Amino acid sequence: MWIILIALILGLIAGVFTKLFVKPEYSAFTKFYVNASENQSHLTQSDMNVAKSLVDTYIEIVKSDTFLEEIAEVAGVNYSPAKIRSIMEASSVGGTEIFKVTISDPDKKTAYLIASAMAEKGPQEIKRVVECGSVNVVDKPKMPVQPSGIGLKRNVALGMLVGAAIVFSVFFVKEAFDVTVYSEDDLTENFDYPVIGTIPSIEISQDKQKKSEKSGDQKAKTEKKEAK
């Protein structure tokens, strides 16, 4: 019960904190198609496999300091390469020759400008470094209209998980260091002596206790009257 209660409370706190203090982010993306050969009229299966293997290499190129410094200059934003990397996500699309670069930023115009600069300069930079094959833009960035989200569900789930973990750890430690004897089994597991007998624990309810007190008072009054 306590695990569930604390998990719900921390999840609620994480949700309220996210709603009040976390700024929504806008995402703009562009997609690139990797060609292992510049001769597209005779594309073979081998060329496609090579292109897939080059995707990770090309992603590292677009994450390089040299390229990101150029991107910041073209986009007209005062962002360092490390800052752009922190708001950038690049990965292959379904294991194909296509990879996607997404820019997420609280300012939708900034996200759009950086993604547009990557779509414009990305193929040139990759060709300059690799000196073979080619890269084409599949999807050009669009100005984001709605925020991509603030991670509300993720933060609520994380808060609930942390709360459950904390309470479980507390109960686990408490149970592990508890040396109280609760039953005969606890005695027989820790000692070799046999249990001869037990003394039952008798609990008197409040109603019975009040009745006994009243009967005792009445008896005392009767004894006083007889004494008189």
Image (spheres, rainbow, N blue to C red):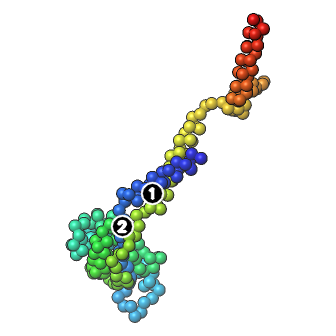
Residue 160 lies left or right of residue 43; in this view the side is right
Q: Nearer the viewer, mark 1 or mark 2?
A: 1
The reply to whether discs 1 and 2 touch (Cβ–Cβ < 8 Å) is no
Indicate whether 180 appears above or below 83. above
Residue 141 lies left or right of residue 11; in this view the side is left
In this view, the residue farthest toward the top is 228
| Mark closest to the chain's N terminus, 1 or 2 | 1
What secondary structure is found at the residue carrying circle 1? helix
Indicate whether 101 appears above or below 215. below
Q: Position of residue 71 (x, y in %)?
A: 25, 73
Q: Which residue is mark 2?
A: 25
- Which image quadrant is residue 78 in? bottom left
Q: Which residue is mark 1?
A: 15
Q: Position of residue 123 (x, y in %)?
A: 30, 81
Residue 217 lies left or right of residue 122; in this view the side is right
Q: Amino acid at mark 1?
A: Gly
Q: Amino acid at mark 2?
A: Glu
**At 30% from the left edge and 69% from the top edge, which residue is drawn?**
107
Answer few, some or many: residues within 10 Å of disc 1's Cα (few below 14, many 20 plus, some between 14 and 19).
many
User: From mark 1 to mark 2, how far is it between C-alphas?
Assistant: 16 Å
